[in-house]
């Protein structure tokens, strides 16, 4: 099982708002380490459901559309900040570099596709991540933008 959290609120087609921090659950569809017979390591993930506050769940099909590193890695010790803001639209108005006075970290926005700011990682069809390295590694706080269909 794969567990993620929303970094911003979203609105479902029904008009219901799902708040930031809500769990999104998925599963691994494919996993291969690089070897003599595999030139690349592979990790496929599909998200299946949103677990809403109060226990309700919404069935989805969520396929990875874009990936970016954790924007908070340059945050000084003792300070916890989520630079993606309360929603995706607000997050695209300020850069991480301006906020932290640190090197820029790519921010995901509604037009983002592929892998931003993570070397040796590529995003293929169906949201499958590949790497020429020994394994596909996603650090804690890695951000993903999904194409979601409500089931």
Image: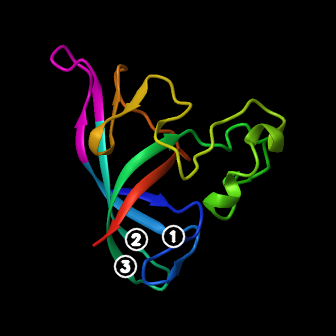
Cβ–Cβ under 8 Å for marks 2 and 3 = yes
Residue under pointer 1: 22
Residue 16 placement (x, y as % from top left): 50, 83
Question: Tag on residue 57?
Answer: 3
The quadrant holding residue 24 is: bottom left
Q: Residue furthest top?
A: 36
Other residues around mark 2 within 10 Å, as few (<14) / some (14–19) / many (≥20): many
Instruction: Tell me which numbered mark, 1 or 2, is placed earlier along the sequence.
Output: 1
In the displayed structure, would residue 136 be above or below residue 52? above
Residue 122 placement (x, y as % from top left): 39, 30
Q: Quadrant of the C terminus?
A: bottom left
Q: Does the magenta portion include 28? A: no
The span picked out in magenta is 29-42
Q: Residue furthest front?
A: 111
* In the displayed structure image, the side of residue 84 where residue 150 appears, left or right: left
> What residue do we see at 35% from left, 19% from top?
132
> What residue do we see at 24% from left, 17% from top?
39
Cβ–Cβ under 8 Å for marks 1 and 2 = yes
């Amino acid at each position: 099982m794969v567990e993620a959290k929303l970094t911003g609120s979203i609105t479902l087609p029904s008009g219901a708002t799902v708040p930031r921090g809500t769990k999104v659950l998925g599963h691994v569809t494919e996993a291969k380490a690089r070897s003599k017979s595999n030139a690349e390591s592979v990790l496929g993930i599909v998200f299946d459901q949103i677990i809403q506050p109060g226990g309700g769940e919404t069935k989805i099909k969520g396929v990875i559309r874009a990936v970016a590193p954790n924007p908070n890695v340059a945050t000084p010790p003792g300070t916890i900040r989520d630079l993606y803001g309360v929603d995706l639209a607000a997050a695209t108005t300020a850069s991480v570099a301006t906020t932290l006075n640190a090197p820029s970290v790519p921010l995901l926005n509604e037009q983002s596709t592929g892998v931003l700011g993570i070397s040796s990682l590529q995003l293929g069809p169906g949201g499958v991540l590949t790497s020429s390295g020994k394994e596909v590694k996603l650090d804690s706080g890695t951000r993903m933008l999904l194409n979601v269909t409500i089931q």
